[in-house]
Image (spheres, rainbow, N blue to C red):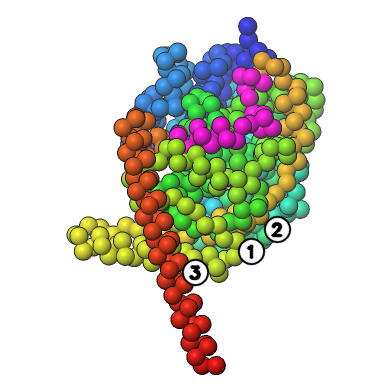
């Protein structure tokens, strides 16, 4: 027997942007596996001369879709690619495809975005802000539209310490109308030159343009059945479609990955601050639940009102600090050591920028220089110097987020959860209050080794990793002892010099 959410999706036609991204793939997999949708249209950029439908066909080789194909071998017959690109002024959608979408689509999930914090402003504006306006204009032409979910981010209003489930227009230096007007009139170079002035208190182009995207929804989505979904930092799956699945190196995952290989040893981080992370399968489940909720609310309030906003972050009763994250990552990472680590995994967290710079030189740059020198002598290409340059740039970009906490209002999210039947809560679970973080990290670290490290989950591979871990542990302790001994000799020499002088 179908649940309420499953019944809502039966024979529905859905249009998804951001389908090739981390969250997009999980949403598509969940729809195909747990509901009986009629069709899913996905917006995909043409790439390297390959037809967009061919790119969809390649997904069938992706490990994330294997559990689905085991039970529904023809599931991808329901997925049709629409050629397009959110950076284009018309979304790059052809007129025939546009007519197809406007005549058939009933549900829209707009998740396409550039998530690079240091993206050029003109690119971030095109994808995160202007494309939002273009998608809303397209949605207004959809004759059968029942629900529209706009995926934003919990950090779209990170200038505030307490982020409410409302529009924070007071944080913007200019309205979305004004900024997009500038964007259309001025050159890309001029827009980029205005970055500091336009961003105002926002730390980067990503959060700023996502905030502008929300302003577009507020100003231009009148009478549309639309909501805004704001997930926090999205990390590996907990259970679905397979535990620990991940395909990207962003935020905390990038740090964990670097530590696992012994490359990353020091970060700019305050271990006492809250780490707002949520599993990707929970995000997908909530997005799908929101589509139904939005359609139901439109029936109740047909004249429309301010679009509702749903923040999604760890629950107050089950928070996770950066210190907790580090401890669990190191603890469970030792169960799944990688076979090609270059040193014993450890992580020094420093919240003082100048002290971090000194530690990064001693623990990253200096060892990297000697390793690269050895590589040159042996006739191989040096690597670590450039790797550490990228790592240090990323750490500085993440600095405003890794040394600060936010509180999120989540009353709307909680009401949504409580309104769901037990069956729907089980199938479309996003209950962060009862998430077992230890169980989560155990699965996530195993998944990171498999999906990002591409290391086989075999006994032989784990044994090899454990041997390498033990070897580097011994070397690590020997180096620590040597450094302590050198420090002792140095201090003793200085004291002897002082006493002799006196």
Camera-nearest residue between 253 and 131: 253
Q: Position of residue 47 (x, y in %)?
A: 37, 38
Q: Position of residue 124 (x, y in %)?
A: 54, 50
Residue reaching furthest to the left: 379
The magenta segment is 425-448
Indicate which disc, 2 or 3, sits on the residue closer to the N terminus.
2
Indicate which disc, 3 or 1, sits on the residue closer to the N terminus.
1
Q: Residue at x 60, y 49 (%)?
A: 323
Residue 271 visible in the snapshot? yes
Element type at mark 2: loop
Secondary structure, magenta segment, majority class:
helix
Element type at mark 3: helix
Element type at mark 1: helix
Pointer 2 with pointer 1, Cβ within 8 A: yes
Q: How many marks?
A: 3
Indicate which disc, 2 or 1, sits on the residue closer to the N terminus.
2
Task: Say if 45 sits above or below 341 in the image.
Answer: above
Q: State the residue position of label 2.
A: 173
Mark nearer the viewer, 3 or 1: 3
Mark nearer the viewer, 2 or 3: 3
Q: State the residue position of label 1.
A: 197
Mark linked to residue 104: none
What quarter of the picture does the C terminus occupy? bottom right
Camera-nearest residue between 336 and 493: 493
Q: State the residue position of label 3.
A: 358
Q: Residue at x 66, y 15 (%)?
A: 423
């Amino acid at each position: 027997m179908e649940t309420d959410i499953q019944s809502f999706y039966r024979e529905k036609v859905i249009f998804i942007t951001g389908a090739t991204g981390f969250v997009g793939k999980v949403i598509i997999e969940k729809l195909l596996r747990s509901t009986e949708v009629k069709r899913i249209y996905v917006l995909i950029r043409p790439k390297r001369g390959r037809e967009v439908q061919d790119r969809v066909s390649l997904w069938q080789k992706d490990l994330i879709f294997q559990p689905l194909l085991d039970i529904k071998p023809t599931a991808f017959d329901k997925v049709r690619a629409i050629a397009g690109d959110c950076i284009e002024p018309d979304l790059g959608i052809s007129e025939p495809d546009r007519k197809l979408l406007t005549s058939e689509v009933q549900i829209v999930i707009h998740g396409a975005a550039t998530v690079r914090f240091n993206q050029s402003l003109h690119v971030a504006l095109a994808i995160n802000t202007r494309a939002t306006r273009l998608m809303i204009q397209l949605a207004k032409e959809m004759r059968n539209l029942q629900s529209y979910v706009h995926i934003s981010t919990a950090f779209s209003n990170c200038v505030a310490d307490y982020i409410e489930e409302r529009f924070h227009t007071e944080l913007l230096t200019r309205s979305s109308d004004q900024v997009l007007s500038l964007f259309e009139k001025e050159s890309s170079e001029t827009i980029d030159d205005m970055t500091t002035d336009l961003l105002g208190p926002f730390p980067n182009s990503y959060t700023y343009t996502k905030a502008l995207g929300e302003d577009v929804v507020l100003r231009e989505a009148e009478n549309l059945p639309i909501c805004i979904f704001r997930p926090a930092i999205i990390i590996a799956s907990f259970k679905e479609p397979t535990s620990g699945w991940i395909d990207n190196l962003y935020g905390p995952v990038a740090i964990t990955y670097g530590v696992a290989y012994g490359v990353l040893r020091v970060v700019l981080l305050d271990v006492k601050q809250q780490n707002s992370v949520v599993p990707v399968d929970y995000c997908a489940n909530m997005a799908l639940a929101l589509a139904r909720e939005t359609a139901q609310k439109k029936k109740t309030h047909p004249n429309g009102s301010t679009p509702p906003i749903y923040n999604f972050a760890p629950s107050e009763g089950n928070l996770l600090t950066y210190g907790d994250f580090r401890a669990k990552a190191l603890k469970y990472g030792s169960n799944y050591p990688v076979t090609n680590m270059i040193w014993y995994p450890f992580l020094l967290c420093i919240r003082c920028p100048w002290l971090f710079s000194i530690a990064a030189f001693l623990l990253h740059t200096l060892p990297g220089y000697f390793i690269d020198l050895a590589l040159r002598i042996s006739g191989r290409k040096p690597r670590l110097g450039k790797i550490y340059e990228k790592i240090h740039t990323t750490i500085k970009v993440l600095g405003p987020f890794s040394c600060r906490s936010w509180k999120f209002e989540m009353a709307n999210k909680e009401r949504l959860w409580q309104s769901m039947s037990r069956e729907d809560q089980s199938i479309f679970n996003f209950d962060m209050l009862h998430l077992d973080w230890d169980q989560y990290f155990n699965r996530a670290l195993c998944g990171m080794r498999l999906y990002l490290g591409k290391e086989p989950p075999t006994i032989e591979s784990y044994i090899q990793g454990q041997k390498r871990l033990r070897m580097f542990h011994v070397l690590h302790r020997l180096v620590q002892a040597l450094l302590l001994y050198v420090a002792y000799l140095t201090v003793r020499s200085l004291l002897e010099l002082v006493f002799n002088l006196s």
